[in-house]
Structures are given as C-alpha cells and as structure tokens.
Image (cartoon, rainbow, N blue to C red):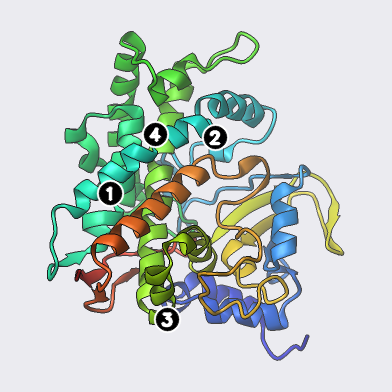
Amino acid sequence: MTAAVNTDEVFIQLTQTTEGRGNPYPLYRQLHEHAPTIFQIAGTKYYGVRGYAECSEVLRDGRLGVGERAVGQDADGEGDKYGTFITDPAALINLDPPLHTRLRRLVTKAFTKRQVDRMLPNTTSIADGLLDKFESGDVIDVIADLSTPLPVAVVGRMLNVPESDWMLFAPLMVDAVAGASPWATIDQLKAAYAASEQMKAYFIEFVADRKAHPIEDDLLTAILRAEENGERLAEDEVNLLVLTLFVAAFSTTAHLIGNGLYALLSNPDQLRILLDDRSVIPSAVEEFLRYDPPVQVAARSAHEDLEIAGTELPAGAQLTVLLAAGNRDPERFTDPDRLDVRRSQGPPLSFGGGIHHCLGASLARQEGQVFFDRLLSRFPNLSLEAAPARRDEIFAFRELRNLPVRLAS
C-alpha cells in the first residue's frame, strides 16, 4: 500500500462528480490498490468499506444498524420537508431489530420460495408477451420496452394490481428512487416527494380494497393474513410495505437486465458463450450482478464501540459499504474487471447480506434468467444500435436511461 493516492479525494470523485458516478470502477480499483479495506473519510465519523470480506462482515454484524439516512443537499434544512416512503423511518429497509425482526418475519411468511417459484410460468408468459410486440430488424429501447415493463408486470400480477395501472408507476418510481440519494438536489427531492405521495395514496386505497375483498393465492392477501404469535401487520405497515416491495422489485430487476445486457453486448465473446450454451444463463446473471450491480452501496451505523478487520470504530460511526467495490475485490475475484459469464467464485454482494438481505433477490434472479433466455432464443443476432445514456446523478444506483438495440433473429 502506498500514499500515492488521496483516499478522501477518490471518495469525493466517486460520490460527488459526474465522471465518478458515470464510471466508478477505475476509482474502486484505486481504492483497492491504495486504501485500507475500511478507511476513515477526512477525519469524520464516516468510513468507507471496500473489501469483499469486510463488506460481508459489516452487513452481517449485529452490532451495526442500517445507518443514518441523509436527505439530499439541504444545507438550509429544506430537504427535510421532502421525505419519501423510501426514507420513512418506519420502512422495513430503515428498521433495526426488534421492529425489523417482527416485520421481516411476518413478511417472509408471505414471500416464500413457493410463492416465487409459482411465478415462473407468469414471468415467462410476460417476457414472451413483451417480445411478441417486436420482430427481427426492429430497433428498440430495452429499458423502456422490456426491462421496465417486465418487473412492473411481474410484481403487478403478484399483488393483483390492475394491468391498466402497471405503467403508471414506472416514471413515479424513477423519481422516488432518485430522491433517496444523500446527494439529491432540492428539485429531485421535490419530485421524489410528489411521486411518493401519489403512490402512497394509490396503495392506501388499493390495500383497503384488498382487505375487504381478499383473493386466494394472492401475495397481498398473504401479507394481510401473515401472522406470528397471533400478531398481524397494522394497516399502515402493510401500505408502506407493499409500496416498498413494488418499487424495490421494479428498480433492482430493471437495471440488472439493462446493465447486464449492455455488458453482454459490449463483450461479444461472452455473448457467444450464452448463445452456444443456454445452461450458462444462471451463472451469467450472477456475473451481471457482480460486474455492474444496480445498487452500488449500503449504509450501516455502529451502535457501540467495536472493531472490524482490525479497524477501531466508535459508536455512531457511519459506514458506506461499497458493494460494487467488494464485487471487484481482486482478493476475492480473479481478474475482477473482466466479465466472465462462467465465473463461479461465490455470490456477489449486490443483494446485501445479513438480516437486510434483499427479500426479492430470488424473484430478481428468476426474472433475469427468464429475460436472457427468452431474448436470446428469439433474437440471437441482436446488436447494440448506439451508446446508451446513463443516469449519473445518483451514486448509490447504477442505471441506464436507455439502451438502443437492434433485434435480429
């Protein structure tokens, strides 16, 4: 390790510059080469975690909570007025035990492997239906035409949201997620707040109707009926939970598909492997999650003085867990900056870990596998039509605005 690179400057470039957010991977490499696996930022209470083993340990350590959630660029406190359901302290993603334990246990009973496995025919049908709209020679935007409608339709069917309402949520969810970044502008926070309020109003009415008219074998009905020691979720808990699940299911899967397909089309040798052997698709989806994950970071907060990987952390320390950096850790992955769809070196960090491991991880994997199988079966000679535009306003999320592709059978 050398002092040739200023870690604070690298972290600032990574989180607060357009160039760094647009392509963080060279900066992650610099951190791996020059920074400790857990490093303090400019003498503050903030720390970065860049190593795979250390990220995994932090995510699973019960002495750490989910972390403070900063609200945008609000030097004058104006941002505090524009909280969304994502930043709501009562949301599952923002809770620590024992409140988190109770809510997660009740939800997990409804979000079982059986529920997800039962969605496979539906997921396949939805993917085929979307692809049926196009033919060889068409130029499409994968983000707008495929990767966004697929998860929205899947979770819409799981919750039995009317099909006519599915795509109402797509632009609202983009705005709401943008407001979750600590570096969001006031304008982004205002747009996120407006989108969040619109979706909250919809789901308050939607949940009330389902409670009055339950549907057998329906995820929302299962959530409403989920019980632990005679205790069920309160109505406001269900409203917030359903909205969070809807958005989480959309955002992760949509950008797993977009980022993964772009990586695949940018590496023709890896595309050829999938075309020749479709059984590689499950490992390819894991590699897409590792190589360019939709969620780049997680936050944790030290509840007490502690030591992790030889680093002393005081109570109140705020840790930025660099999931995407951990996924590129050369001590964990061979040649980590290379896409390798046959890679088999253990799971990526992309769905988090510990008690906050993503509830929808198995569903996202299912949708990703179905998408690539059906797309490559229909249009094996597809190609990139133009360079995509990337959303670079938010460090925490890795998303494409569009992905122009020419379909070819």
Q: CA distance from mark 4 to mark 2?
A: 11 Å
* Number of marks present in the image shown: 4
Residue contact between numbered discs 1 and 2, judged by CB atoms under 8 Å: no
Amino acid type, callout 3: Asp
Q: Looking at the rendered structure, which numbered label has been put on residue 127?
A: 1
Q: Secondary structure at mark 3?
A: helix
Sequence-first disc among 1 and 3: 1
Direction from residue 382 to residue 316 in the image, left or right: right
Along the polypeptide, which appears first: circle 4 or circle 3?
A: 4
Who's the residue at 63% across and 24% down the image?
A: 102
Residue 79 seen: yes
Q: Residue at x 55, y 40 (%)?
A: 93
Name the mark nearer the viewer: 1 or 2: 1
Asked whether the beta carbons under mark 4 and mark 1 sit within 8 Å of each other, the answer is no
CA–CA distance in space, label 2 to label 3:
41 Å
Q: Is residue 398 left or right of residue 190?
A: right
Q: Secondary structure at mark 1?
A: helix
Q: Mark 2 = which residue?
A: 92
In this view, the residue in front, 196 or 125, is: 125
